[in-house]
Image: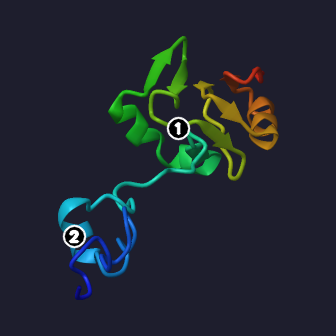
Amino acid sequence: MKAGRGKGKKGGSGMAGLHKHRWVWTIKNDPLHFGGKGFTSHHSGVLDIPITLSELDDNLDRLRKQGYVTEENGGLIIDLRSAGFTKLLGSGNFDVKSSIKIDKITEKALNKLSVAGITVETNDGRSKE
């Protein structure tokens, strides 16, 4: 009996050799066998989108044109939540009499705004006048 006439010499049984000598079969018949489609995101979730006091001062007119700033009782109400920002940082200065709505605020920004007499409404419990 010559070699290979029976069950022998088939190059392994089952899935053996899929990454070696049966590679063409793998590509044709089972292309997702080794994964390679998609990825797993390892980010924790929602990221903070910050704005500084100086950026707020520079972009106040643009925010007003977009409808995120309204006037009430002689002061402004700035809704940074609706504008897509989640955190207010304290670098720079902002001294326009207003009330600001934001999710999070740093201590430095809160101190600067409270000295200027600006009211801040937050979701993290920090609210001062």
Q: What's the residue type where badge 2 is placed?
A: Trp
Query: Taking the image as drawn, is residue 79 in sight?
Result: yes
Q: Where 123 falls versus 110 (above or below)? A: above
Q: Residue at x 58, y 36 (%)?
A: 86
In front of the other: 77 or 26:
26
Q: Residue at x 26, y 67 (%)?
A: 26
Q: Residue at x 57, y 48 (%)?
A: 43
Contact flag, marks 1 and 2 (Cβ < 8 Å) = no
In front of the other: 33 or 113:
33
User: Residue 101 at x, y = what percent?
Assistant: 59, 24
Callout 1: SS: loop
Name the residue tied to disc 2. Answer: 25
Quadrant of the image occupied by residue 3? bottom left
In front of the other: 13 or 119:
13
Which numbered marker is on residue 85? 1
Q: What's the residue type where badge 1 is placed?
A: Phe
User: Residue 8 at x, y = what percent?
Assistant: 32, 76
